[in-house]
Image (cartoon, rainbow, N blue to C red):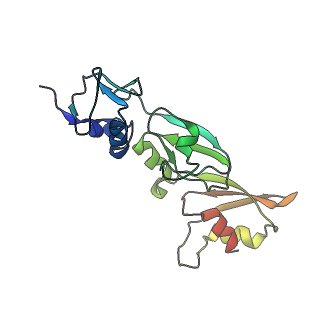
């Protein structure tokens, strides 16, 4: 006999949605199993025909990776509690989440995936995957600022950043390209504030 799973656990295991989201969909009568409206706590097998809002769901065939140019004002979270979250903005039909974060007021390239292993391989500081940011400043970038980034900046709370590369155009001393291999909270902004 095929293994039976609670439908919320099954939908979570295939990356469709969280268990809590599945329970909400069940309570709203939006999930059907083999033609009948499913209920909270119902057990199913993987071979049964499941639809959500009339769209069939099942084992995901491959991992999803999306390159997305995030605009200002969108929050890098998959939490539906957060207004203007990236998942609602994209309206993607399966569960996805951002790889790393960009601040709400920042725009730029962001990867979005449903593959946790891939996300970890990109965001873990141990993997040393470089991330580049273009920063536009009010003041000019000095040689001392470039050296401080290279030496590794320490925040006022004692947090130490790894060595980073800061480059600036000879013709535009107010714009810098920062290369880091970690992703602390508001890191690039805080690094500039420390100089």
Q: Determine the residue located farthest toward the right in the rendered image.
A: 171
Residue closer to the observer: 99 or 56: 56
Residue 58, picture quadrant: top left
Q: Which residue: 61% across, 72% down?
A: 153
Q: From the viewer's perspective, is 51 left or right of 98?
A: left
Q: Which residue: 66% across, 51% down?
A: 73
Residue closer to the observer: 67 or 106: 106
Query: Could you tell me which quadrant the N terminus lies in?
Result: top left
Query: Could you tell me which quadrant the C terminus lies in?
Result: bottom right
**Is residue 39 shown above or below 119?**
above
Q: Determine the residue located farthest toward the left in the rendered image.
A: 1
Q: Determine the residue located farthest toward the front in the rendered image.
A: 28
Q: Residue 34, percent across and down?
A: 27, 21
Q: Residue 144, percent across and down?
A: 74, 73
Q: From the viewer's perspective, is 13 left or right of 151?
A: left
**Is residue 14 shown above or below 185?**
above
**Is residue 65 shown above or below 173?**
above
Q: Residue 164, percent across and down?
A: 62, 62
Q: Which residue: 85% across, 58% down?
A: 172
Residue closer to the observer: 13 or 142: 13
* Mark count: 0
Q: From the viewer's perspective, is 175 left or right of 71?
A: right
Q: Residue 50, percent across and down?
A: 32, 25
Q: From the viewer's perspective, is 116 left or right of 82?
A: left
Q: Which residue: 88% across, 57% down?
A: 171
């Amino acid at each position: 006999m095929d293994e039976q799973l609670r439908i919320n656990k099954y939908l979570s295991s295939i990356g469709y949605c969280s268990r809590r989201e599945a329970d909400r969909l069940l309570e709203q009568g939006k999930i059907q199993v083999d033609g009948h409206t499913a209920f909270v706590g119902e057990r199913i097998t993987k071979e049964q025909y499941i639809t959500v809002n009339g769209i069939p769901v099942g084992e995901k065939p491959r991992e999803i990776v999306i390159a997305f140019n995030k605009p200002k004002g969108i929050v890098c979270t998959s939490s539906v509690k957060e207004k203007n979250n990236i998942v609602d903005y994209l309206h993607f039909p399966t569960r996805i989440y951002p790889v790393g974060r960009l601040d709400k007021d920042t725009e730029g390239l962001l990867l979005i995936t449903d593959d946790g292993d891939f996300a970890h391989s990109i965001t873990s500081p141990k993997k040393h995957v470089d991330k580049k940011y273009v920063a536009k400043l009010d003041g000019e970038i000095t040689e001392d600022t470039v050296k401080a980034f290279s030496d590794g900046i320490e925040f006022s709370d004692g947090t130490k950043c790894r060595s980073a590369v800061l480059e600036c155009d000879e013709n535009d001393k107010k714009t810098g390209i920062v290369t880091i291999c970690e992703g602390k909270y508001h890191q690039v902004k805080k690094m500039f504030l420390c100089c």
